[in-house]
Amino acid sequence: MQLKHIKLSGFKSFVDPTKISFSTNMVGVVGPNGCGKSNVIDAVRWVLGELSAKNLRGESMVDVIFNGSEKRKPSGQCSIELLFDNSSAKIGGEYTSFNEVSIKRVMTRDAQSDYFINNTKCRRKDVQDIFLGTGLGPSSYAIIEQGMVSKLVSAKPDELRTHIEEAAGVSKYRERRRETESRIKRTKENLSRVKDIRDEIGRLIRRLENQAKAADKYNQLKKDKTKLELDKAILFSMEAKNNRDKLQKKLDAHNRDLKIKNAESETVQSQIDQFRTENESLLSEYELAQKNFYAVGAEIAKREANLQNINKSESETKYSLQKAKDNYEKAKETEKNFDELSPSEKAMHILDSIILTIDKFNINNESIREKAMELKKLLTEILNIASAQSKTLTDEYLSRQNDLEEQIEEAEKLKSSIQDEMKDFVSKSSDAESILIALRQKQSKFNDELRDLENKKSIADLDSKSISEKITNIRLELKTYEINLDNSNKKIKEAGIDVDTVNFSDYEDTTLDEIEDNLTDIETKIIRLGAINLAAPEEIADESKRKEELDEQYNDLTEALDKLNGAIKKIDNETKTIFKDSFDAVNLKLKEMFPKLFGGGVAELTLTDDDPLHAGVVLMARPPGKKNSSISQLSGGEKALTALALVFAIFDLNPAPFCLLDEVDAPLDDLNTLRFINMVEEMSKTIQFIYITHNKVSMERSDYLMGVTMQEAGVSRMVSVDVNQALKLAES
């Protein structure tokens, strides 16, 4: 079986879909530090079912998904597919007939993983099961990563034993033993459960026997109860029939009374309808009279408003006239006293005196005399203007007085006309009011008569309602008796008795109270019996049969447990034999390979216990020229060669499909590297080696070189070279 290729997509630094083919048995993977070479090893470990993020150099499992770079977005999922050449049919079981077997794992950002075998979804366990005994697995000796060399040689005895068991194929037996132990556990649980159930069924059968006795008593009481219930039904039938007949007579009488009351109500209703028809005519007449009354009242109100307006206007006119008189009298009084009171007149006298004085004393000042004469002239003009204004005022007053007196006279005439109209309207209002009073009296009398009729109608309706309620109650009661009668007759028929053939006279001396007392007594006895299982006899038979089946199951399980314990012993013996033989073979091969790698020295494996089944494995190594035997005292290169010697010894016992080595030659010098690569080349005839290296010697000896580059930050790419083909081209 050989690994043909790996397909990566979105896994760590391999963001783009990448196919890595392995066409030879010595494939070297090279590249600078940090370019993603170890991610190829992690991919193989991950697809084989690794669950520890720490073992994959991450903090969480989703760290295996490409987390993005400066130029790329994070991937939503990652997938790894391994394709194996199975032409040798090393992968057995249902996949023996397949020349190629594909193992695939896909994981999304929510940490949900799916496994596929030949593109068929499966479980993680299914993937691990097909590689049992082949040396492959997430933590197998076929995958040696950086740092695992020192861990391998420094492993605890139990951990070192696991690698040898895997090479020996003991893991299959371990799995068989685990499954057998699980079956033993389940068998013991089933055995205990069957025993508990069997014991419980025994107790149940005893309870059912007691229940069967109680069921017999219950059945007898039930028969007695049925007989009494039949008697009760017959008596109920008798009473129901009698009461039904009585109620039917009452119902007939009430129906007759109801017809009479309904006829009375209809008669009164007819009278009410006639009165209401008459009332409609009376209402129309009343509305017309009321309309006329309101119209006359509106006219009277209108005339009164006009009269008030005229009185107001007349008052205002009289006030204006009186005011004009007052103003005129005031003006006359002013004119009358003008010569006496006017300062201008006084000025005129003074001026005349001045002029006389000037003439008397022959004052020759013409200027003064001229000024006095001018002033006198001016005062004379003022007096003339004042006199003219007084006359104008008088004329205006007389004209205004005449206008106002005419307005007052016209107002008096209009008042007289309106007062005459109001007398006429008051008369009409009085007539309309008399008509309204008469109509109101007539309507009041009509309403009294209507109320009397409505009262009669209400009484008749109440009587009808009361009778209807009585009829309804009787019908309900009658229905109850009908139902009781039907139920009673049904029970009688169910008892196989014809109702018509029952001789009710046989029950004349029997009362319902006596029957009820007897029924109560029987029901009390039934209650005292408690819960009754009427199916107890049938259940006893069923449970007895079930107990027999459980007895058989118990015997079968006991026999199966003995066989499983025997199988455990057989597996342990086979495991012990196989492990001891494999241990001896690996130890012998280790003693042979260690000197080849070291150029001498001694190495061997020892058991920590005499029991090969549980003993751990201890590794002892003594390089040439050294006396120490403790692994911890070896140098890094010595530890690496010792680990490789052990791995190669295990591979010789059970070669895995391939061996992955991650820079295991890093601590080796050129001489030891040459020894290491010679052994790899020798073993590559039967085993496929894929190794990551920086060593030129290892690179030169590779048949096929794969270069891992990271031209784009955070993104790995593959470049492959067929060394043999390249050499042929170079030679040519």
Image (cartoon, grey):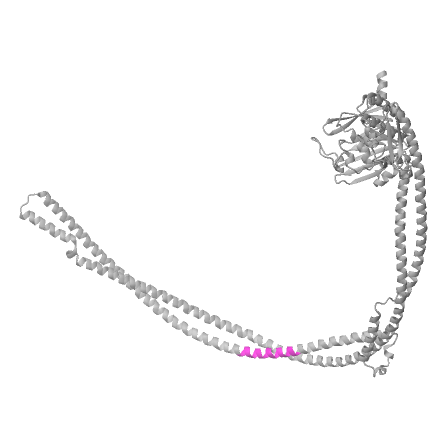
By secondary structure, the bulk of the magenta-drawn segment is best described as helix
Front-lying residue, 266 or 236: 236
Residue lying farthest to the front in this orientation: 627
Q: Most extreme residue toward the top, as rendered?
A: 732
Instruction: Decide if residue 724 is on the left or right side of residue 566.
Output: left
Is 451 colored magenta in this rendering?
Answer: yes
Say left or right for 546 vs 720.
right
Q: Which residues are magenta?
A: 445-463
Q: Is residue 184 above or below residue 40?
A: below
The image quarter containing residue 665 is top right
Q: In terms of image quadrants, where is residue 206? A: bottom right
| Residue 115: percent from left, percent from top | 82, 39
- Residue 641 forms part of the magenta stretch: no
Residue 689, visible in the rendered structure: no
Instruction: Give the image quarter of residue 368.
Output: top left
Q: Percent position (x, y) of residue 297?
A: 43, 70
User: Quadrant of the image for the N terminus?
Assistant: top right
Can you see residue 618?
Answer: yes
Q: Is residue 562 left or right of residue 642?
A: right
Q: Position of residue 399 (x, y in %)?
A: 26, 59
Q: Quadrant of the C terminus?
A: top right
Q: Residue furthest left?
A: 361
State whether residue 328 is above or below residue 179: below
| Residue 16 place in picture, x, y as percent | 76, 31
